[in-house]
Amino acid sequence: MRIHNALFLPPRPDGWTVDEVLALPDAQTLAQRIELVDGALVVSPWPGLEHQRLLGKLQVALTPALPAGTELLPGVNVRLGTQRLLSPDVVILNCPGIDTVACAASDVLLAAEIVSPSTKIQDRVLKRALYAEALIPYYLLVEPGEPTAATLFELQGGEYAPIAKSDKAEIELTRPFTATIRLA
């Protein structure tokens, strides 16, 4: 029996570290997305086409609206301590031009996640809590469907509070900058 695209990594008694995950060979990481939460590997498949289309819409809508001193990048590793590493679908960094394999959470102005069937709970609950704990000022959650929905959260008192919600497959942002994202 042959197993394709499987990831076989031994558990570590003290958990994995960000540096160990970032040092994994490409052959182990190209087939699946690997994130790290409190030393435990979180492995999920790469997103499908609907997800990629939404990602493109986000990039097209947000890039021209970016204020000076920021940069939008898809699929960047974000370090949230020594045993936490997440890869948001989109980040807006407050340090354009940085050259690193993993940005610090303090460099992220906004993290965006597009919910996938295999990551619903992670995107809606776990990542939202981890980004808030890492003090990332804004979190954009996009929910594919009919219609596609989106909510922008702002960090307030250590937790995210919704500050904008989509209406008729469109979301209007006024913070951290002004932008209109058409989701349909």
Image: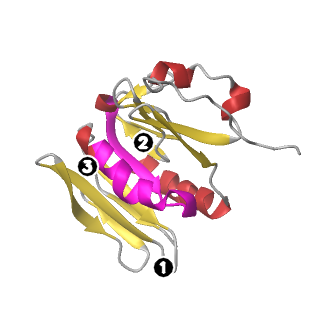
Q: Nearer the viewer, residue 30 or 100?
A: 30
Q: Position of residue 4 (x, y in %)?
A: 81, 44
As displayed, is residue 6 above or below residue 11? below
Q: Residues within 10 Å of mark 1 (few under 14, many from 20)?
A: some
The nearer-to-camera label among 1 and 3 is 1
Color theme of the render: secondary structure
In the picture of the structure, the residue carrying the numbered disc 2 is 91
Q: Is residue 124 left or right of residue 45?
A: left
Contact flag, marks 3 and 2 (Cβ < 8 Å): no
In the picture of the structure, the residue carrying the numbered disc 1 is 147
Q: Is residue 75 left or right of residue 26?
A: left
| Main secondary-structure element of the magenta-colored stretch | helix
What are the residue bounds of the magenta stretch?
A: 107-131
In the picture of the structure, the residue carrying the numbered disc 3 is 176
- Mark 2: amino acid: Val
Identify the element where label 1 is drawn: loop
Instruction: State the CA–CA distance, disc 3 to disc 2.
Output: 13 Å
Residue 94 makes an appearance in the image: no
Spot the residue most to the front. 13
Q: Position of residue 33 (x, y in %)?
A: 59, 41
As displayed, is residue 143 above or below residue 5? below
Identify the element where label 2 is drawn: strand
For image coordinates 22% across by 62% down, the residue present is 163
Is 128 covered by the magenta stretch?
A: yes
